[in-house]
Amino acid sequence: MGSTDLIITGKYGVLNQQKLLNATSNNINNVNTVGFIRKETQTYTSCVDWGVGATYTRRIYDQYVQRQMYSDCSDYNYYKSYAEGLDTTDRLLSDSTMSVANAMSDFFDELSTAASLPTSTANRQAAMAKLDIVVNRFQTANESMFDSLNDVNSRVHDSITEINSLTRSIANINYEIRSMALSDNHVNNEIYLQMLDERDRLTGELSKLMSVKVVEQDDGTYEIYMSTGMLLANGDSYGCLTDKLNDFDSTKRQIYLSYENTEDASRNIANVQLTIDSIGGALGGYLNASKEIRNTMRELGKLAVSFADAINEQNKAGFTLEDKAGGDLLKIEDVQGVSSNSSYGITCSFIEGKGENVEAYDFELIFTAGTYKIYRRGKDDTRVDITDEAVISGNKITFEDDKYGISLELGNTTVAALTATGAERTVFYVKPTVLSASTLSSIISKPEDFAFASAVRTRTGDDNYGNAVISLTSCTATGTNYGVSVDATSHKPVFNTNAPNKIVIQANGDYNVYYKDPSDTTNSIGVLLGTAPASCKGVNVFANTVWNTAHGSGFPGYEVTIAGTVKQNDEFYVEINEKGQADNSNANALTSLRSEKLTKTTGSSQTTTLNEGYANLLALIGSASNSAKTNTEAAEAKYEQTVKMFESNSGVNLDEEATNLLMFQQSYQACAKIIEASQTVFNALIAAF
């Protein structure tokens, strides 16, 4: 029996060393295999089975480091995708050759040159060309951002397709792993170990695209969740994401989660809309980039409206080279909104002269039987109820003090009809400024259309006793609500009834303000409109006048100052500036718009200059882009550190494996020697007989 014992002992030794050699060889062969985790075969000694106990092959890895690696991978890819999504927009807006701010500065510079020679059509032509460049810059910037938005949305769709493929694959592998574990076919099963490696690889790929949390179950399966706790995959079902265009905003993607069963793919469960901040990973980064780009488009549109409105209003306050009232130089298009009921429409118009009130908001109106709500939506898409600020008149909605610089018209219906008993719930959505920069256009047809001369001029009375003189401080607006409007037939400025055009000094030094009808020869004094106190000392007389009749803000649209010593009964006049083509006062006013605060900071009461408004826009997108890039670098460093920590344990070390290979080879040879020795003993025993 002695030789037989040696043979059996050698046999088990050889088989055991063969398993050790197989594990080591497998590690060496897969040193460059993606997702491979180092294997180790362990042997437990036993007094049974000839000194060799059970052998188990296991994967060598730290599951806690692995979970952290998934988290760090999600963070890194989130910031990387966020930065990539914003990069094109940031570079476009900050490029000096494409800068809207530089184009506006060039226009105002050229306008200043033209103002020095107001009758020169050549200088006006140059200013006209510069204005066209400003419009082109607005259009190009907005259209390029729109292209970037479409590109980011395409990446969102591609990411979702890849996520769905991964969750389906993970769920299917989970199912197979559980089946093998329940049938006890998983012990020392190389296929089982390979499936575990593949599942971990797929989970790592999924963590690039969205934030995931992994929980291992007793049956060996993974339950994979989103950071918010929504299930993505287990052994029975898997999550399927779908991206849908928002019903009211075609530039916005909404993400929904539903579930399918691993055994019955046709079985679809639930359909939950996900919030952007709950997703993480590359998909979350792209979604947040699209949100940032949309907001930048709103801000650029707001700036375009403010610029165009200011230029138009000031030009309409003057005379053209053809001795006509100035008109609009730029066209600001009305914006068509979207309705949940195709029978109704909504149109947003920008109120003339209120461009500085426009903010970068979208507006949502919800009408139900008996009530209505109006909301504004900004960058974070949060609803803010502004119903109490609305002023309703039939089918038209404005806001107190023209707060947002817009009016909304409901087309062929009224607010009353939409809130009547039994009325169907109807939702309207309008985006006033998202595309306003791209729809802005120049409508100046010839250089003579620049209104360089003011609509009015001043004159000091010939028979005054004092030495004071009157001067025009500004002329900013015309229209029916102001002192001057444009005659529909002659297209020339004319005084409105009760326009202040005459000032008479009183005994106590007060400034009585009158309207004197130029065509009325019977009334030499005119109609008393109000009085400015002597304490104003002639500075901005109309702003200091206490009017006998209430007027809106900005009345009368022009301002005068009386400087010098005044005496009782001294008279001063404001006249229509007929044949004043050589006058450049309105040209100077147009030029001075560059330094006036004309655009509102969204969400604030602050107004800034046009260039400051563009700088603020650059700061918003630039800050977001730079922050994303900085966070990408930090997240990448942390991720790389975690990967090295994980691979230090689970990765294949060729030096270590080569050492093991030599050791197990020698052990194999030694066990083979045992068999050889047993054969020698056996032969010796046979020979003895």
Image (tube, helix red, strand yellow):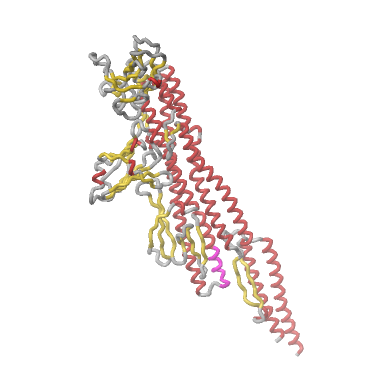
Q: Compared with residue 232, is residue 506 higher up or lower down, i.e. above or below?
A: above
Tell me the residue at 50%/35% (across/down).
95
Does residue 256 show up magenta in the picture?
Answer: no
The residue sitting at the front extreme is 508
Image coords of residue 112 (percent x, y)? 44, 21
User: Where does the image place residue 564, in percent across and percent down from the top left?
Assistant: 42, 14
The residue nearer to you, when weighing 676 against 161, is: 161
The quarter of the displayed image where residue 312 is located: top left
In the rendered view, would you say 185 is above or below 63? below
Q: Nearer the viewer, residue 466 or 415?
A: 466
Q: Is residue 449 visible?
A: no
Picture layout, residue 552 above or below residue 369: above
161 left or right, relative to 80: left
* Residue 236 horizontal side relative to residue 399, left or right: right
On the rendered structure, is 410 left or right of 183?
left
**Which region is colored magenta?**
187-197
